Amino acid sequence: MNDTPSEKSDRREFIKCASCVIGGAIGLVPMAAGVYVAMDPLRHSGDGTAKTNDGFMRLATLEDLPLGGAPMKYSIVADKADKWSRYKDMPIGAVYLQRTTEKQVVAFNTVCPHLGCFVDYRKEEKDFFCPCHNSNFSQTGALKTGVSPRGMDSLEVELRNDREVWVKFQHFKANTTEKTPVNS
Amino acid sequence: MMKQLFDWLEHRTGARKVVNEALYENIPGGSRWRYVWGSTLTFTLAVQFITGIFLWMGYAPSATSAWESVHYIQEQMTGGWFLRGLHHWTAQVMTVLLVLHLMQVVIDGAYKAPREVNFWFGVLLLQLVLALSLTGYLLPWDQKGYWATKVATDILGSTPLVGSYLKELVLGGADYGHHTLTRFFALHAGVLPAAVIALTAGHIYLFRRHGITAKTPLKKRDEYFWPEQVLKDAVACLAVLATVLFFVVKYHGAHLDAPADPSSNYPARPDWYFLFLFQFLKYFPGHWEVLGAVVIPGIVMTLIFLMPILGKWKLGHRFNIGLLCAVLIGAGTLTISALREDKANVTYQASVKQAANDAIVVKDLAKTRGGIPPDGALVLLQGPKLFAQHCAGCHAYGGHNGLLAALSGPQSAPDLKGFATREYLTALLDPAQFKSAKFFGGTKHANGKMAKFLEENADALAGTNKVNLAKVIKAVSAEAGIQSQRPMDTRDATEIAEGKKQFEALGCTDCHSLGKWNPEDSTAPDLTGYGSRDWMMALLHDPSHERFYGKKNDRMPAFGKDQKLSRQQLERIVDWLRGE
């Protein structure tokens, strides 16, 4: 049976079309499955952050912090879940503690609000200094000079039992003027 | 607009010419279904590259993270089971397609001049794909992969003169460990794929250079590759994908056994496509093994490699077809006999069943215990394994031995699932249940003071004192500090404090103590810290200590005091029982 030229052309077009559709579909399956799985972190955002009871951790006592003295660095150690693993007592960050009055302690996250570098305290200059992009903060955490969009991130502090210093450890969104907590 | 863009691109890259050359290849006698095998293999290769790279994003090659990361991909990542299933089942289907492609090439005589080099490229590709299968099998670091690969590397190690050096190089050390995985992974995801890409490029180039080996007589007039043959190839690839998807859905991805455990009696078996070699070795005892493992497979592979040269001989082509048929029939027969032997082997079946149970237990623990400790998932399994070995002779755990298997004899001591929880104590203090086989029915305590106390006070405890008993239960259970109950314990602090007072009011202090051990008045186990880690460790150390059962101890061994188990082993059991 001979097809007319028009039928032949239609058939050829159909074959071309079918080839492209099937070819595209079979390629799409593994690629889509892979991309979908690669997007998994977006479906679990917030996982892997350290868990503490009410967010507050006991870091020091008032006696540990000299009145009007230089800020002192304290490591934050907590249980941490990281994908399949659970860790006990892992270092998850650090804070600077500074006793400003008899019964008042201020705390700063050691991370620069600009792009997350670890900020040093300079004893001679009595300031905080970020070694990455040279942002400079006063002892009160206020931005003095540099590219950081805001001052150092202060943390909530509670005095419990009249002498224990408890700090609510948090991270904040980098490089924004507003101080927005992340993964909380 | 599009035309201008394509023209621009063509002028700079010559892409159109390349595409045209690829699509408008002449096929003598027109498109045929028998020409699809090469394309299906290229397709499966592409699937493996795509899925492999995405799996790579979630895989962590080390002895304490490989199984754990694969388990995470499979169980926690949305769609991870599907991705892993695609990779696994495509690998299986690829092996079948390789054999079909080889059969087609040999039967059609497509290895003959001038296509010898291309045939050799193909044989090398076959070996590379088998090497990919072998290396990939180990990567999940589960029982199946570990033991199968161990046999393969031990065979390598038995190679005369250089075996031990080769083995050490492959393993990255004297024994299996972190570097075994990093090396296998580098081979599987780096070295071998690079070689496959290079050889496949050469294979396709040479195939195009010499053209298709047309099956004569030609039934139709010549056609271009596009679109008739492309459609046939695409439909064949679709059928391959459908087959893969069928298995992916049927088995919900790919099987993952319990984590590799060098101390277990897991029956080592290679994957099905190497089963014939495994079976073959059974016929070569002792020092003859090298014949079955290296010499004969080497001769067969050499003969396959020499097919283009043998084919020049008058009866060469027939010899080649005969050889291939003999190898395939031989391999098929050996595979069937291996499967039959295993099916009839009761010990093997029991081991497989136990391994499957281990996998269920460890996956459940990984899920319910808030993650896997840094030491790896194998540590999670140690608790139930030690319990099954040392405790399940008398105790049960949820009606089984801790590893989902039946107890070897009748249960004669309490079922310890949920030990010290509120539910556990509520059931224990029910007079009927206390004397049942679930608790103390199989011990001399069935007729002891506690049983009598519960019977004599049954009405009061179920009536006027029901509320007070509930408070006592909460108070005693809170002593354990069980992780899953902590929020409840914090919430019920007032009732727990009240429960401690009721402990005395209900007469519990006549025999037990709570809050502080009082050796003078206590004639029954001290309930201070009952069910806590320290309390349980002390009990396991010596249950006959006067703080616990003293002389009334029925049969429980002093695991710590008599050094039956190490402190670390006891901790594993205790942590597991406490749900930590």
Image (cartoon, rainbow, N blue to C red):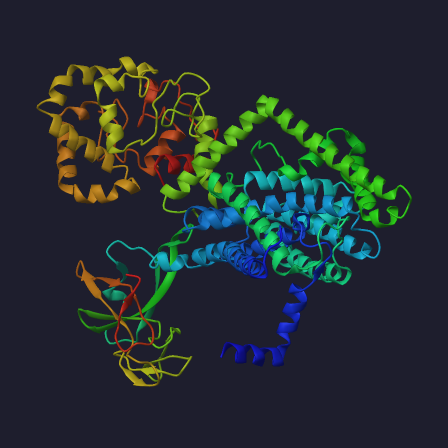
- Residue B226's place in the image compared with A116, above or below, is above
Question: Which of B267/B575 is in front?
Answer: B267
Q: At which x and y percent is residue A153?
A: 28, 73
Quarter holding residue B363: top left
Pick the front one: B170 or B186: B186
Residue B145: quarter of image: top right
User: Quadrant location of the C terminus of chain B?
Assistant: top left
Residue at 37 percent across and 61 percent down: it is: A92
What is the tally of numbered marks visible in this picture?
0
Q: In the image, is A62 to the left or to the right of B561?
A: left
Kindly tell me whether residue B410 is visible in this rendering. Answer: yes
User: B168 or B524, which is in the foreground?
Assistant: B168
Q: Does any portion of residue B160 appear in the rendered image?
A: no
Residue A181 is left or right of residue B356, and the answer is: left
Q: Residue at x 59, y 61 (%)?
A: A5
Q: Position of residue B554 (x, y in %)?
A: 36, 18
Give the x, y percent position of residue A37: 44, 55
